[in-house]
Image: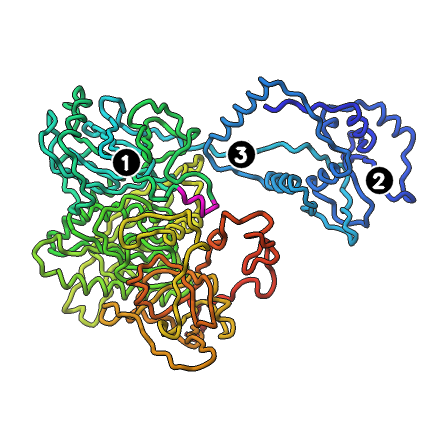
């Protein structure tokens, strides 16, 4: 606790003199106000004597003198503005209190202990005003009244009767919600130096962990996971070595497949669990490394006392250096390392060898705010049932995952992909949630063919190229529902064409099962869009997220009837089969506690995914990032719109031709190409006639021209218009899209996706006074001030409204 503030005699005298007040039994208080010198009200001698004889309480000693300045009758100031006025007038001064060294050390320890607590701070209006005032006072800037007004000459308005102002006290931890303390998120694995060891060989560091039957290990970090003996499961993926656990070290060399696993603080942490060897495992072989007999001999020598109890031995190696831990250098909305807990958060001894591998932090005891990924029992049983039914019907699984937002649809989709990969070589995945996309940034509707396990959140697999994609350009389907459905229908048709090519194959693993992830908007128009998608996909299975307590989070009770197939003209000949409806358990988090991932809003999640997309270095290959080189430092591609572009589209906004370049500059655009018979075409190579002067690009506005037809287009990815050079007819584009795909681009399309402010700036040169030594008033396109009035925001075109006659 901070030491009590002492009030000197001088300050006490000032308080008596200026802020004299009398508290009586009447419902009103009499306070002395300072008026104009010619209009000062006299106070009777009896009242003066009464006030002087009245003892001063401790509460009144803590009051700051209330000052009122001569102004016309206007609204009173707030307590905070009055406190600042009192400070400026010299009527309230902080008294320096001598603190011993021991007391200072104790205070520092208490502050460190409080800061180490995880949680979300709940601020009242008063708390926010206090923080704002404190920041203003630190920078010595003029204070603008929070309430009331100012006179023409800039003086403050008078106060109301008896407005006490208390000294500033921090309420930083007063209303903080406590962190989650979850014992089920702790590893069942009991670490020791007899079941875990770190060994270096040929410049590579390996961590070997022996798991007993039913044991698991929860971790935070980014690692490559391989299985030496036995089998494990991670987020639904079964990784198997195909080898039983031996009693002694084998004399042969073994190949081990390693799989990238990302377990950051933004999501539930991954859990590695030992599984029986007879369970079906993923068929994809990934990044094989040879473990020789000498290395295994050293491992078994350490594990010799515990080998008989072990069911599985896993091998872990670090993938630190891929750049993910440096994301905070770019995205400034958070400061903590995404894949590493700091010492205050991870309060456990690090004396065992299991702690010695960089990038791997096992959770061996209850840790505040940590929550591990939990596989509900219904997930396993329902997915297994869907795969068995598909085998009996001799067709692939065609599924739709639906439910309200924040119900776990994305987590289940990743889980289901991993489960399907144990039976099929690849899985088709259609993303229709344009607000929180899985394999692309938001604003895209895409079809991916996934052939490797997905062990991490969306921003850890942005390197996977889409089979077909469309630029929707908005975070919600409400912007253009018709175009939204048209894009989804075309992706379903594309998948059907590819499935027809392999459906005659007798081997099930060659078939292409389909997962369609839907948006969380399940009311009104959103519910109608969901039903339309289901009718088009014609799924064999529908997975609906359901909560047993909060019925308002569930789909309407008419859902089972609404998903029945629609009869058509040939209904009497062809009877469509009703899909199987599976309800999946959903456990919502207790609102009385918070976790580490609660510190990240949906907007921050989108920013992280966008940063991951644009800062990746090997799109289409292995994932890696370069966050040290900011977007403003990168060399852009140059596109001559006369040679390489057929047209430029602007959707959701009405932009005139003479304002086209202003709209495009510094914006996010989609890189579109042509498609004929579901095949991507090469880019255009227009010939340029020798002519002097400027040639404007072909501009298509949605007011005169409809949006691009999904049937004949595709999107290769996103780009940022870095600059425009009209003299060279050139657009300078920043994009991670490979050159082979960029050469196929024939159109640019801009929607309502906004470029985050942090992406416009160079954090190395950014200062509080401006950007790159340029004052804020002269920095183009961005401002620190709030914009109001005409032209402050772009006009939006609503395409989900119809006239009464329609």
Q: Quadrant of the N terminus?
A: top right
**Which marked residue is nearer to the observer: mark 3 or mark 1?**
1
**Pointer 3 with pointer 1, Cβ within 8 A:** no
Q: Is residue 236 magenta?
A: no
Where does residue 13 sit, x and y in percent of width and height?
A: 81, 26
Q: Residue at x 14, y 33 (%)?
A: 292
Q: Which residues are magenta?
A: 326-333
Q: Secondary structure at mark 3?
A: loop
In the rendered view, tell whether residue 705 sits above or below residue 235: below
The first of marks 3 and 1 along the sequence is 3
In the rendered view, tell whether residue 653 sits above or below residue 302: below
Q: Residue at x 74, y 26 (%)?
A: 61
Residue 175: mark: 3
Residue 271: mark: 1
Instruction: Please identify the quarter of the rendering in which residue 35 is found.
Output: top right
Residue under circle 2? Answer: 34
């Amino acid at each position: 606790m901070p030491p009590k503030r002492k009030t000197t005699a001088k300050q006490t005298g000032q308080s008596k003199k200026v802020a004299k007040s009398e508290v009586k039994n009447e419902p009103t208080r009499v306070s002395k106000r300072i008026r104009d010198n010619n209009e000062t009200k006299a106070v009777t001698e009896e009242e003066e004597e009464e006030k002087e004889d009245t003892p001063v309480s401790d509460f009144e000693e803590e009051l700051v003198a209330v000052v009122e300045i001569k102004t016309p009758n206007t609204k009173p100031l707030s307590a905070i503005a009055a406190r600042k006025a009192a400070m400026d007038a010299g009527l309230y001064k902080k008294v320096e209190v001598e603190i011993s060294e021991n007391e200072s050390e104790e205070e520092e320890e208490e502050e460190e202990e409080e800061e180490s607590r995880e949680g979300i701070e709940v601020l009242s209006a008063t708390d926010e005003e206090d923080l704002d005032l404190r920041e203003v006072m630190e920078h010595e800037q003029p204070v603008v009244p929070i309430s009331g007004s100012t006179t023409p000459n800039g003086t403050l308005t008078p106060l109301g009767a008896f407005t006490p102002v208390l000294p500033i006290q921090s309420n930083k931890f007063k209303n903080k919600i406590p962190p989650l303390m979850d014992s089920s998120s702790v590893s069942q694995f009991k670490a020791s130096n007899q079941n875990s060891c770190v060994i270096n060989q040929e410049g590579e560091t390996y961590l070997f962990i022996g798991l007993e039957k039913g044991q698991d290990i929860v971790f935070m970090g980014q690692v490559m996971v391989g299985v030496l003996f036995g089998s494990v499961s991670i987020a639904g993926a079964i990784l198997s070595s195909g080898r039983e656990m031996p009693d002694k070290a084998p004399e042969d060399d073994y190949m081990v497949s390693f799989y990238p696993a990302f377990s950051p603080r933004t999501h539930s942490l991954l859990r590695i669990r030992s599984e029986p060897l007879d369970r079906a495992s993923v068929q994809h072989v990934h990044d094989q490394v040879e473990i020789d007999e000498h290395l295994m001999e050293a491992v078994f020598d350490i594990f010799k006392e515990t080998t008989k109890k072990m069911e599985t031995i896993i091998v872990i190696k670090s993938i630190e250096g891929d750049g993910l831990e440096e994301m905070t250098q770019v995205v400034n909305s958070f400061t903590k390392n995404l894949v590493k807990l700091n010492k205050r958060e991870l309060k456990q001894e690090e004396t065992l060898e299991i702690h010695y591998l960089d990038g791997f932090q096992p959770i061996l005891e209850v840790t505040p705010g940590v929550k591990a990924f939990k596989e509900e029992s219904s997930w396993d049983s329902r997915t297994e049932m869907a795969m068995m039914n598909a085998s009996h019907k001799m067709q692939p699984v065609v599924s739709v995952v639906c439910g309200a937002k924040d119900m776990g649809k994305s987590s289940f989709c990743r889980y289901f992909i991993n489960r399907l990969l144990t039976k099929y070589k690849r899985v088709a995945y259609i993303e229709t949630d344009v607000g929180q996309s899985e394999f692309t940034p938001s604003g895209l509707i895409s079809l991916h063919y996934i052939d490797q396990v997905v062990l991490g959140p969306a921003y850890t697999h942005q390197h996977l190229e889409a089979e077909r994609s469309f630029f929707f350009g908005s975070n919600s389907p409400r912007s253009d529902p018709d175009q939204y459905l048209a894009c989804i229908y075309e992706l379903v048709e594309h998948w059907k064409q590819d499935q027809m090519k392999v459906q005659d194959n007798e081997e099930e693993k060659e078939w292409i099962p389909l997962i369609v992830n839907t948006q969380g908007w399940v009311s009104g128009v959103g519910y109608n869009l969901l039903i339309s998608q289901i009718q088009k996909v014609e799924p064999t299975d529908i997975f609906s997220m359901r909560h047993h307590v909060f019925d308002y989070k569930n789909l309407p009770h008419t859902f089972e009837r609404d998903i029945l197939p629609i009869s058509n003209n040939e209904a009497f000949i062809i009877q469509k089969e009703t899909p199987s409806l599976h309800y999946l358990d959903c456990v919502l988090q207790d609102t009385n506690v918070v976790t580490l991932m609660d510190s990240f809003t949906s907007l921050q999640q989108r920013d992280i995914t966008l940063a991951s997309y644009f800062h990746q270095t090997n799109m289409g290959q292995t994932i890696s990032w370069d966050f040290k080189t900011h977007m403003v430092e990168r060399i852009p591609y140059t596109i001559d719109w006369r040679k390489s572009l057929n047209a430029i589209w602007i959707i959701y906004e009405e932009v005139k031709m003479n304002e086209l370049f202003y709209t495009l500059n510094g914006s996010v655009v989609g890189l579109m190409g042509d498609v004929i018979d579901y095949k991507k075409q090469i880019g255009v190579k227009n010939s340029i006639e020798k002519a002097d002067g400027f040639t404007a690009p072909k501009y298509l506005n949605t007011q005169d021209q409809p949006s691009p037809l999904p049937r004949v287009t595709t999107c290769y990815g996103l780009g940022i218009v870095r600059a425009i050079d009209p003299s060279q007819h050139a657009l300078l584009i920043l994009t991670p899209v490979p050159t082979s795909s960029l050469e196929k681009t024939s159109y640019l399309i801009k929607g309502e996706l906004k470029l985050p402010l942090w992406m416009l700036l160079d954090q190395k040169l950014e200062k509080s006074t401006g950007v790159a030594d340029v004052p804020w008033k002269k920095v183009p396109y961005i401002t620190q001030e709030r914009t109001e009035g005409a032209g402050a925001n772009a006009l939006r075109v609503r395409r989900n409204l119809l006239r009464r006659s329609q």
